[in-house]
Amino acid sequence: MNLKVGFLALSIVGLGFSAKAMAQTPPSACQAGPDFDSFEAGVASGRSLARQGWAGVSGDCLQLERFASILVDNAGRLMAPPGSSSYVLCRHSGIVAGVYEEVFNAWSSCRVEACVAGNFIGQLGGKLACDIALGFGPVHILRFLPALPATAFPLLSERCCGNAFDSELQQCLPGSSWNPVREYVCTPPSP
């Protein structure tokens, strides 16, 4: 019963962030037509996935690593198969964007260890980059990757993010190294 009440409360609180989600700019490959609609549907799914995960740990700041692990596992099961269309990849990109947004909304009330946040972002970004590379080739990765919320960068360790990203990439495409993509995922944009 407490879980249901907690989930309901978290969902109601999450509604307050919907204006922020609408203002989110999709990656360049997902900015028009059905791909845009697919991205937006993905954002809603990702936000819901993150809210459910947060409710699953009862919003307990002491369980941040478990929360991140649950989300990475769940998002990994939702990732696109090789050869997916841009519509499918935009939806998955939206899922990642929605998860990013809700995770950092939830974590903003906790003292997040920078390496926990960095590992989470690196893993999720690496999984998505791998799916995109398998679907369209490495040259198109940055066209589909969502940007992190600006509030994310003070919370994460670039080193831990980069290591987790590289680890995901090596599992998918051994011997690959995509420094520009890792930097896009793990490094704050220049002012």
Image: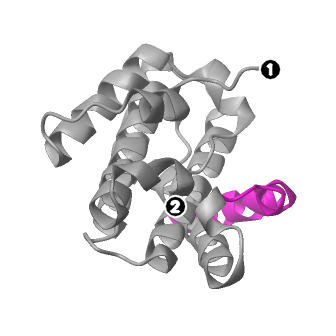
Confirm whether the magenta stretch covers residue 17: yes
Which residue type does callout 1 highlight? Answer: Pro
In this rendering, position of residue 148 left or right of residue 177? right
Which residue type does callout 2 highlight? Answer: Ser
Mark 2–mark 1 Cα distance, whole angstroms, equals: 24 Å
Residue range corresponding to the magenta coloring: 1-26
The secondary structure that dominates the magenta segment is: helix
Q: Mark 1 points at which residue?
A: 191
Question: Percent position (x, y) of residue 136?
Answer: 36, 64
Q: Name the residue under label 2.
A: 93
Q: Say above or below: 102 vs 87.
A: above
Disc 2, SS: helix
Q: Which of 112 and 36 is in front in this view?
A: 36
Q: Can residue 128 be seen in this view?
A: yes
Q: Which residue shows up at 39% across the image and 26% down it? A: 179
Question: Percent position (x, y) of residue 32?
Answer: 71, 75
Q: Say above or below: 156 vs 29.
A: above
Q: Which residue shows up at 52% across the image and 38% down it? A: 60
Local packing at callout 2 (Cα closer than 10 Å; few below 14, some 14-19, many 20+) is many
